[in-house]
């Protein structure tokens, strides 16, 4: 072989190597840009008690909103949802599970649903959901509430219609959050439709005291924030979405691998932007408060499981007695049973199945036993602190009165 021929072949080989290197670098950049989240492989090989997948076009994922404070080694899942990606109907369905639901947790007995994540992380939390509600979940997505601030700021805020009875409590929570973070944050000036920044939206999704509807209303507010975020994303161009993805992925922890995420995204948007729907279990009138200080929500888990299964696989919205929603798949009707219908939950949105006097005080009961999980009793002052660190006392009927 002549030297010139050798040179030509060498140039070809080097050219191919350079092209391959460029492709590899671009691929690596794209991977890190779009899938640079925290990947958790700890679920592999774990028995999650998942049921048989009933429909290959429907994927159920657990979504955990974590409240991890500085110095914590374990996280409380203050927000627990089942996210259903329904490619058949072009929908993303969110089902909120009440965190105080009384359920059985493997090796721990009966406890609140959100205790499962604290006791055993995502694997025990998923197993608990599957065992109590008959679901087929094998994957999860988790976002810390602190990270939600960064995500919403990356969206340049979200549009929220703040109600008049929410303003004072929202500003109190914003102020307390600022003290906790050692910073000063801007409160809201008044009620009405307005753009909330990350801190304001985070605190809006946290409020549940001061006559704002307790935990039931907080669940609704969390869905309002998610819907506002989804609306903002829908308005973005392709280039804006790419830039947003690069900003958001560092704040997400999930058990889904990049090879699992890609087909989920493709399937969800193949027929256009999917519709977003939200509901929660238990339904109104199907539950009771339970426990010495009414710290649990008690309801028939089999009935709740039926609601969840019918909604996920047959598109029957929980509590909807008509067939219109299931047959049309429409989500734009503004009825009390429709998804994300703007129902005003500023007053208590639900009622128990029967009247219970379990909340009445009993002088023979140890006061410390009346403190909620994660909270405590101060014997010196006779006051209580809830899991958020807010101080209150119990009135003659056993109801909480915050200072």
Image (cartoon, rainbow, N blue to C red):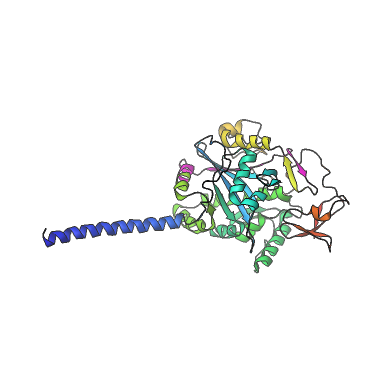
Looking at the image, residue 204 lies above or below residue 321: below
Where residue 269 sits in the image (x, y, percent)? 47, 44
Whether residue 52 sits left or right of residue 7 in the image: it is: right
* Residue 256 visible at all: yes
Whether residue 37 sits left or right of residue 210 in the image: it is: left
For the C terminus, the quadrant is bottom right
Instruction: Look at 73% across and 38% down and name the residue there.
Output: 286
Where residue 209 sits in the image (x, y, percent)? 74, 54
Q: Is residue 299 magenta?
A: no
In front of the other: 122 or 394: 122
Report how many numbered discs are placed on residues in the image. 0
* Residue 227 visible at all: no
Residue span colored magenta: 265-291
Where residue 351 sits in the image (x, y, percent)? 76, 41
Residue at far right of view: 363
In front of the other: 88 or 59: 59
Instruction: Please identify the quarter of the rendering in which residue 189 is found.
Output: bottom right
Where residue 180 sits in the image (x, y, percent)? 67, 65
Looking at the image, residue 157 lies above or below residue 182: above
Instruction: Look at 11% across and 60% down and name the residue there.
Output: 2
Whether residue 362 sits left or right of residue 126 in the image: it is: right
For the N terminus, the quadrant is bottom left
Instruction: Look at 71% across and 37% down and name the residue there.
Output: 300
Residue at far front of view: 107
Instruction: Look at 54% across and 52% down and name the residue there.
Output: 232
């Amino acid at each position: 072989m002549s030297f010139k021929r050798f040179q030509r072949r060498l140039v070809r080989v080097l050219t191919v190597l350079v092209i391959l290197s460029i492709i590899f670098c671009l691929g690596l950049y794209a991977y890190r840009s779009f899938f640079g989240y925290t990947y958790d492989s700890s679920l592999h090989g774990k028995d999650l008690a998942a049921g048989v997948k009933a429909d290959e076009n429907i994927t159920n994922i657990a979504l955990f909103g974590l409240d991890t404070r500085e110095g914590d080694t374990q996280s409380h899942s203050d927000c627990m949802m089942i996210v259903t990606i329904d490619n058949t109907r072009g929908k993303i369905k969110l089902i909120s599970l009440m965190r105080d639901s009384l359920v059985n947790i493997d090796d721990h007995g009966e406890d609140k649903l959100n205790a499962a994540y604290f006791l055993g992380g995502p694997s025990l939390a998923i197993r608990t959901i599957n065992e109590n509600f008959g679901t087929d979940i094998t994957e999860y997505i988790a976002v810390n509430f602190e990270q939600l601030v960064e995500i919403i700021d990356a969206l340049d805020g979200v549009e929220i219609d703040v109600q008049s009875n929410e303003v004072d409590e929202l500003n109190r929570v914003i102020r307390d959050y600022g003290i906790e973070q050692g910073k000063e944050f801007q409160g809201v000036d008044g009620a009405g439709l307005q753009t909330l920044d990350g801190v304001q939206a985070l605190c809006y999704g946290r409020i549940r005291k001061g006559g704002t509807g307790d935990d039931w209303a907080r669940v609704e507010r969390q869905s309002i924030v998610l819907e506002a975020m989804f609306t903002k994303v829908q308005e973005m161009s392709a280039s804006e979405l790419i830039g947003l993805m690069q900003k958001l992925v560092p704040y997400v922890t999930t058990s889904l691998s990049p090879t699992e995420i890609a087909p989920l995204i493709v399937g969800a948007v193949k027929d256009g932007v999917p519709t977003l729907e939200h509901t929660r279990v238990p339904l109104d009138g199907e539950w009771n408060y339970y426990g010495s200080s009414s710290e649990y929500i008690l309801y028939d888990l089999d009935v709740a499981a039926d609601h969840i299964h019918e909604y996920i696989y047959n598109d029957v919205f929980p509590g909807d007695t008509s067939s219109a929603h299931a047959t049309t798949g429409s989500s734009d009707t503004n009825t009390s049973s429709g998804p994300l219908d703007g129902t005003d939950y500023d007053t208590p949105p639900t009622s128990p199945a029967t009247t219970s006097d379990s909340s009445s005080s009993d002088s023979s009961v140890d006061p410390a036993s009346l403190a909620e999980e994660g909270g405590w009793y101060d014997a010196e002052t006779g006051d209580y602190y809830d899991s958020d660190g807010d101080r209150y006392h119990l009135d003659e009927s056993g109801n909480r009165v915050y200072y």
